[in-house]
């Protein structure tokens, strides 16, 4: 077959046959990569006949006379209908409230059009002779920070959940710690608390604890549940005593680093003891019928999505017990790889108690999160919790197994080569199939968005460019051998806006790094707040931009979880850490470049101190590397002075800490996602330096 025909099919299917690097150089995607990615989209092209058949099917799908499941539109704007409506003259609208309206379909340049538009946002139905289609009619933009606090500048904190401490947390920070921190932050006038991802990981493999590599984004990590919120502290203590866990709990809670495997074992043992008590009391109908009814309602409302996740968790544990090397569902026996198989049904029948335990875990986690957000709002926070949505999910996990039609099995999300990663990046995550999104009425995307907004006042979308395109790498290929796959960005923008207003939740889009031209402006037009981080706000000469040049529509931050806190950066501690890594680590600083990095840091210190002083955020002589306190104060004042509607202060900078939560380019050679803050979450912000820095932030509100 000709390369031209292959590239034509790829272009029509949304797989870009070329890409531009950060220097503007155009690169051709290899035919092997195009064929692999097209096959994942259901468009085989291993021969001339397969390619011709794929072109035919693609053409049929775009010009189908069948009604699609869902069409997106904007409020009060004309709605252009797909080809299925070409011969139709009239239709009937059925609004969400049940009211009905007969409408005339007019002929427009792009097909049949509902020219009057629709006056009310929501999910309405269009009834035609060819079937019923959902019309998702969105407001012109998302619910925004400006809608929360018109004309004001507000602030919040950002925290890594696992790093918070409270007595009884089994050595892993949980929502009890979040709740305690939120109450303290609210007393300091904070309106938001942004959290690290709470997505479900792998209960049977607690050593896989990276929060941005979830098993499923539809469900929560039960290790972050606080059962005392539901059952009371006394009953939880009694369960710990019954299981003989108190000594080991106290030991784990004293550690500076989370021991994920051991802490998970203890926390799950505690929760399993509580589940047995719950079975014997509430579910047996002896008392507290309210909790039993709530649990049963939760399971019923969770439907097949919850059932699929619970089944995966039970199957995964059983398979690992039989074969510790079977870490992915793709390594399971063929019958278990199909969630609808007879073998899986037999397992479910014979392990109903274990599956109900996983329902219980999700119920505890969801109810803990709901209580925590309620606490935030009752304490006066106008936003409350801001959840974090990872860019994808682990291809070995729950979502990939239970919803195989949703995803691109055999592809991994990453990034092409750039200045910082000459070999590109492979993040080890899978992503939604854009074709499956459209054909499935965007159900996977909507379920994911609703999951992270259910008990939150906002969400941060990691790698927001994923709404438009993703760099996908075929299995077994290097990151340099990927290609960009396009997503239906306008549809996703509209659905995000609609869900944002329905939940009255702000949307933050992580837009750091190199993006397609105009993408930040498109985010701003949707009222999706971008991010501005002090460390990155520099001009072409290396000077830090004045705070008054920052965008009103963005969220201001001193640092992110992937950067050294301000104190650690000023000390050069991050350079020392990287120099101490094994040479095999991609984050390692070799001896021949170490001094150059230190000299560059000295220059950067000079630039930063000058910018802080020029902005009135600091004064006097530049402090030495071992005296970062006034620099941290200055960085906080600087970001507080920006016009950004929301400023988020990472807890590491509020406390003046040195170590960063995550060091990109490392896995086991650095304690990523393990560091715990000193002291209880309820008293962290009582430290004099933290009190002063929160006051600096509070002043931006006046």
Image (cartoon, rainbow, N blue to C red):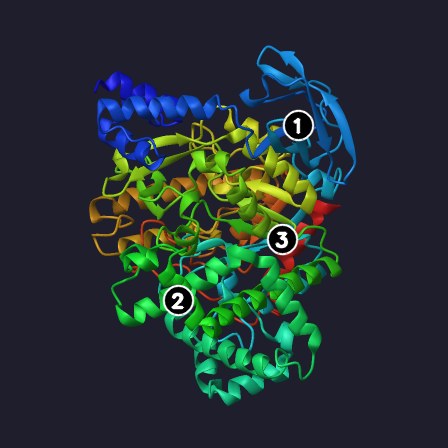
Figure check: 642 above or below 349: above
Give the SS element for disc 1.
strand
Give the SS element for disc 3.
loop
Marks 1 & 2, CB-CB < 8 Å contact = no
| Quarter occupied by residue 473 | top left
Q: Position of residue 307 (x, y in %)?
A: 50, 60
Q: Which residue in the structure is indicated by mark 3?
A: 454
Q: Position of residue 506 (x, y in %)?
A: 64, 43
209 left or right of 693 in image = left
3 or 2: mark nearer the eye: 2
Q: Nearer the viewer, residue 617 or 101?
A: 101
Local crowd size for mark 2, using a 10 Å CA cut-off: few (<14), some (14–19), many (≥20): few
| Quarter occupied by residue 312 | bottom left
At horizontal 46% and vertical 23% (from top left) the residue drawn is: 62
The image shows a total of numbered marks equal to 3
Q: Which residue in the structure is indicated by mark 1?
A: 74
Give the SS element for disc 2.
helix
347 left or right of 294 in image = left
Q: Position of residue 554 (x, y in %)?
A: 59, 37
Q: Nearer the viewer, residue 684 or 597?
A: 684
Local crowd size for mark 3, using a 10 Å CA cut-off: few (<14), some (14–19), many (≥20): some
At horizontal 67% and vertical 17% (from top left) the residue drawn is: 89
Real-space Cα separation, disc 3 to disc 2, in angstroms: 33 Å
Q: Nearer the viewer, residue 545 or 701?
A: 701
Q: Earlier in the sequence, mark 1 or mark 3?
A: 1
Figure check: 644 above or below 85: below
Local crowd size for mark 1, using a 10 Å CA cut-off: few (<14), some (14–19), many (≥20): many
Circle on res. 346: 2
Q: Earlier in the sequence, mark 3 or mark 2?
A: 2
Note whether residue 26 is visible.
no
């Amino acid at each position: 077959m000709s390369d031209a025909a292959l590239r034509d099919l790829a272009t029509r299917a949304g797989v870009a046959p070329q890409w531009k690097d950060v220097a503007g150089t155009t690169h051709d995607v290899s035919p092997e990569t195009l064929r692999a990615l097209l096959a994942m989209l259901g468009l085989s092209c291993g021969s001339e006949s397969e390619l011709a058949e794929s072109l035919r099917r693609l053409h049929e799908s775009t010009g189908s006379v069948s009604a699609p499941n869902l069409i997106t539109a904007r409020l009060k704007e004309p709605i252009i209908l797909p080809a299925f409506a070409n011969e139709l003259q009239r239709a009937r609208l059925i609004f969400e409230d049940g009211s009905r309206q007969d409408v005339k379909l007019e002929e427009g340049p792009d097909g049949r059009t509902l020219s009057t538009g629709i006056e009310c946002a929501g999910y309405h139905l269009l009834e035609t002779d060819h079937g019923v289609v959902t019309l998702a009619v969105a407001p012109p933009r998302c619910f925004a920070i400006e809608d929360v606090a018109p004309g004001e500048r507000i602030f919040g904190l950002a925290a890594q959940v696992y790093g918070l401490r409270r007595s009884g947390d089994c050595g892993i920070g949980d929502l009890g710690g979040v709740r305690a921190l939120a109450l303290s932050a609210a007393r300091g006038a904070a309106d938001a608390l942004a959290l690290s991802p709470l997505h479900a990981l792998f209960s049977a493999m607690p050593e896989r604890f990276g929060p941005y590599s979830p098993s499923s984004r539809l469900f929560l990590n039960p290790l972050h549940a606080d059962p005392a919120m539901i059952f009371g502290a006394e009953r939880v203590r009694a369960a710990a005593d019954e299981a003989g866990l108190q000594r080991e709990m106290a030991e784990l809670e004293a550690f500076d680093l989370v021991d994920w495997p051991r802490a998970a074992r203890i926390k799950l043992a505690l929760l399993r003891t509580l589940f047995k008590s719950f079975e014997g009391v509430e579910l047996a109908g002896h008392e507290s019928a309210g909790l039993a009814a709530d649990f049963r309602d939760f399971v019923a409302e969770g439907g097949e999505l919850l059932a699929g996740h619970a089944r995966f968790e039970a199957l995964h544990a059983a398979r690992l017990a039989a074969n510790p090397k079977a870490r992915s569902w793709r390594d399971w026996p063929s019958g278990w790889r199909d969630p609808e198989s007879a073998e899986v049904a037999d397992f479910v029948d014979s392990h109903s108690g274990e599956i109900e335990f996983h329902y219980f875990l999700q119920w505890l986690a969801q109810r803990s999160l709901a209580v925590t957000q309620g606490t935030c709002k009752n304490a006066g926070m106008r936003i409350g919790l801001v959840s974090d949505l990872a860019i994808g999910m682990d291809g070995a996990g729950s979502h990939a197994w239970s919803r195989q039609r949703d995803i691109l099995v055999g592809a991994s999300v990453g990034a092409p080569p750039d200045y910082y990663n000459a070999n590109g990046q492979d993040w080890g995550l899978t992503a939604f199939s854009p074709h499956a999104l459209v054909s499935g009425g965007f159900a996977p995307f909507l379920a994911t968005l609703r999951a992270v907004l259910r008990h939150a006042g906002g969400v941060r979308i990691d790698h927001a460019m994923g709404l438009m395109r993703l760099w996908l790498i075929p299995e077994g290929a290097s990151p340099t051998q990927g290609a960009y796959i396009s997503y239906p960005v306008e549809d996703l923008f509209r659905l995000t806006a609609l869900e944002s207003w329905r939940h009255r939740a702000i949307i933050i889009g992580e837009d750091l790094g190199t993006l397609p031209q105009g993408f930040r402006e498109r985010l701003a037009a949707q009222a999706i707040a971008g991010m501005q981080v002090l460390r990155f706000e520099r001009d072409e000469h290396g000077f830090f931009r004045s705070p008054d040049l920052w965008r009103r529509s963005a969220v201001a931050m001193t640092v992110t979880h992937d950067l050294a806190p301000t104190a650690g950066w000023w000390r050069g501690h991050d350079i020392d850490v990287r120099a101490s890594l094994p040479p095999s680590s991609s984050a390692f600083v070799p001896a021949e470049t170490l001094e150059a990095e230190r000299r560059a840091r000295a220059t950067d210190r000079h630039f930063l101190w000058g910018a802080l002083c020029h902005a009135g955020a600091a004064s006097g002589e530049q402090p030495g590397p071992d005296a970062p306190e006034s620099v941290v104060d200055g960085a906080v004042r600087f970001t507080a002075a920006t016009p950004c509607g929301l400023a988020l202060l990472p807890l590491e900078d509020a406390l003046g800490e040195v170590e960063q939560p995550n060091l990109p380019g490392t896995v086991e050679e650095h304690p990523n996602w393990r560091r715990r803050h000193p002291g209880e979450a309820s008293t962290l912000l009582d430290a004099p330096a933290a009190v002063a820095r929160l006051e600096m932030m509070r002043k931006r509100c006046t």
